[in-house]
Image (spheres, rainbow, N blue to C red):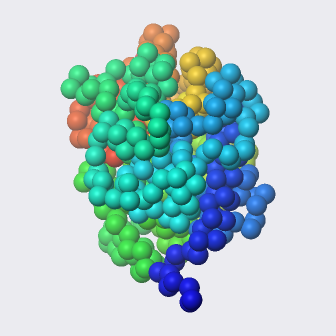
Amino acid sequence: MSPSPRTPGSLSPSRAATQARSAAQAVVWVMARCLGQHRPADRCLHDYCTQNHQLGSRDRRIISETLFSVLRWWGWLQKLAPQRFLEAWKEGAQDLPDHTDGWEALLAAAWVLENRFDFPPAVMAWLRSAELYPELFQGLPADIPVAERRRNLRPFFRSQAMPPLSLEELLPPWLPRELTPLPSDIPFSTLVEWLQKRPPVWLRCQEEDPRAEATLPLRLAQEFPQSPLRLAPHPKLPHAFCLRYTGANLRGTQAFREGRFEVQDLASQAVGFVCAPRPGQQWWDACAGGGGKSLQLAYLMKNRGVVEATDLRTTKLEELKLRARRGGFSNIRLREWQGTHTPEAYRDRFDGVLVDTPCSCAGTWRRTPDGRWNTTEESLQEFSRLQRQILEAAAPAVKPGGTLVYSTCSMLKAENQDVVDAFLDAHPQFILTPHIDPVTGNACLGMTQHWPWDGDCDAMFTAKMTRRKQ
């Protein structure tokens, strides 16, 4: 009998089973190190792929999508986890077991919770291993509220009763105590709904000619004729384009290599517009990291003036050097800075100082769901101490009449309002500066907390201050 035909891109049963085993091994290996050693999931995944060169692009994609789906829904999915793994994790063990036995149902359930019922061959193999069948999920609505997705998990618990699953379990139990107060008309369930959504990719165009910027969607679409890109400009924020997920390798495009755009979240882009630098000014990006905001400041200054970019990690500064060269920015200067003392040459020097401090990154939990489970209340106190230290050390560099902007990609009060309030109490020469929120267009008194629903973006806090002239 001749083998049954397969659709283009499908796998034979044996190849699907092999891919399913390989992907399960990778996901569990990363989960064990991410949750046990409190390491970022993307770094653990990079380590695994580096050690396993035989993985193809299709394998890596299945692994990545499954891993981050599991982490996003871990608050519920942990109730399907093998008991030995769950007990070790709850006891705080660093060496979590990475055997794959008993994980198949959990891995397939992650795809069901994502409302993705076009199961790849590996997921079909996991369902078969768990003695479940795709027909169970056919006809389910593709877009239902998070609270209603609980019922789709019932088949995975087999003969046992499905345990209670609350929305609050999808986030760490300490979050309500530490969260910046939500707007009065927004319930906590809305935050949960948004944090469970896969985020879009935001691009920041770096074209000098506005007419060229308008053609960016067409240029990118031409580079991906088999996977049309849905690229839409933001209605209020100039140069910002929203890209829905396609799996396209944007950094491999000719437009990216020519420095015509950078990948930067909308909320992060808003910080540059709050800074509002002018051509010819001098700005200091005190915690530049990889330099996304340094590049934006240089762009807004039309490559005139100086952007001093500092960080304590020289590897990040090297990354920024490459990005600046690709974008054609000659006004960015790099320097290592430990964040403890104000350099004497910097005192009273800068028209503006941006302090985008290290933080819990709780505002990025849509992109980095592992942060929900690796961040603790104790770590928040350490972040708060570090943030106050860096802000204190950077502020003297602002000249009289200059601007000081403090920002974090967080939604936690201890890292945001509490830090700014303490700083202002100790430094009456600085006052909050009213401005227009560039994302929403609303007026604010100086401090803004962006939420995901403000623009389908990360949560981000920004405070704009001015140093009195006398």
Give the quadrant of the C terminus: top left
* Horizontal and vertical percent position of residue 460: 42, 35
Residue 318 in the image: state x and y as whole percent.
70, 53
Residue in view at x 63 percent, y 37 percent: 82
Q: Is residue 312 visible?
A: no
Residue 29 is situated, as x and y percent measured from the top left of the image, at 70, 46
Q: Residue at x 64, y 32 (%)?
A: 83
Above or below — where is 179 with respect to 450? Answer: above
Q: Would you identify the image quadrant in which residue 338 lies?
A: top right
Instruction: Please tell me which residue is depicted at 60% across the width and 68% down the height of the picture.
Output: 16
Foreground: 203 or 190? Answer: 190
Quarter of the picture holding the N terminus:
bottom right
Give the side of residue 112 with respect to residue 283, left or right: left
Task: Give x and y (percent) for residue 203.
Answer: 43, 58
Task: Name the outermost residue toward the top.
Answer: 425
Tell me what residue is drawn at x 54 percent, y 47 percent. 105
**In-front residue for pair 5/462:** 5
Q: Which one is nearer the viewer's eye here, 421 or 104? A: 104
The answer to whether one can see residue 127 in this image is: yes
Q: 269 or 327: nearer the eye?
A: 269
Question: Is residue 393 rendered to the left or right of residue 401?
Answer: right
